[in-house]
Image (tube, helix red, strand yellow):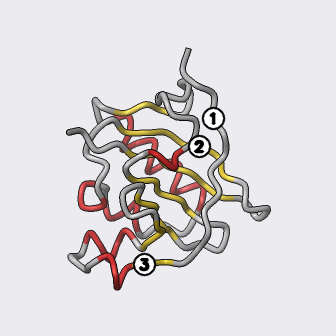
Amino acid sequence: MRTKADFYVENDKNELSWVGSLYDNGEPWNIPAEILIQVNPVMFEELTLDHLRKNKSAIAWEDRWPWEWPTSESTDYTYILCADGNLIAYSSEEKTAFDPLMIAQGEDMHNARNFKIVVFPKMRKNA
């Protein structure tokens, strides 16, 4: 089964802007470390878009929302560069936020949990 991922940048009003998505290989250990350690929103977006452009299973932000579901709550993994500079991820299976770098380094979900409440924006369904 393909592991899907969405990427967002959060602004200082806690609003999320979609950067793009992956159809496959969305697990934290498949995301480049340079993205997972990023604290600068502009660099996060540039590095993410570069990764998406190089990946055949990607959808860049210019494209329409790719999923049949209306929010990222149902996407396998969602990566968010928060306004405070912390990168978190959300797992639809675990229904929790976590530090994706810790998971990529082999830590278990219990120790990597982040208790941030994530509110995903409603996205347009792909026509």
Instruction: Describe residue 92's horizontal placement relative to residue 121 as left or right.
Output: left
Disc on the earlier residue, 1 or 3: 3
Q: Which residue is mark 2?
A: 18
Secondary-structure class at tag 1? loop
Q: Which residue is mark 1?
A: 123
Cα separation, mark 3 vs mark 2, equals: 23 Å
- Which residue is pictured at 63% across the width and 28% down the height? 124
- Depth-wise, is mark 3 or mark 2 nearer the camera? 3
Q: Which amino acid is tagged 1?
A: Met
- Depth-wise, is mark 1 or mark 2 nearer the camera? 1
Q: Which amino acid is tagged 3?
A: Arg
Q: Which amino acid is tagged 2?
A: Trp
Is the residue marked by circle 2 packed among few (<14), some (14-19), or many (20+) residues within 10 Å?
many
Cα separation, mark 1 vs mark 3, equals: 26 Å
Disc on the earlier residue, 3 or 2: 2
Farthest right residue? 13
Secondary-structure class at tag 2? strand
Farthest top residue? 127
Q: Which mark is residue 113?
A: 3
Relative to 85, say whether 68 is above or below.
above
- Which residue is pictured at 47% across the width and 57% down the height? 79
Image coords of residue 80 (percent x, y): 53, 59
- Quadrant assignment, res 58: top left
Relative to 96, say whether 48 is above or below.
above
Farthest bottom residue? 111
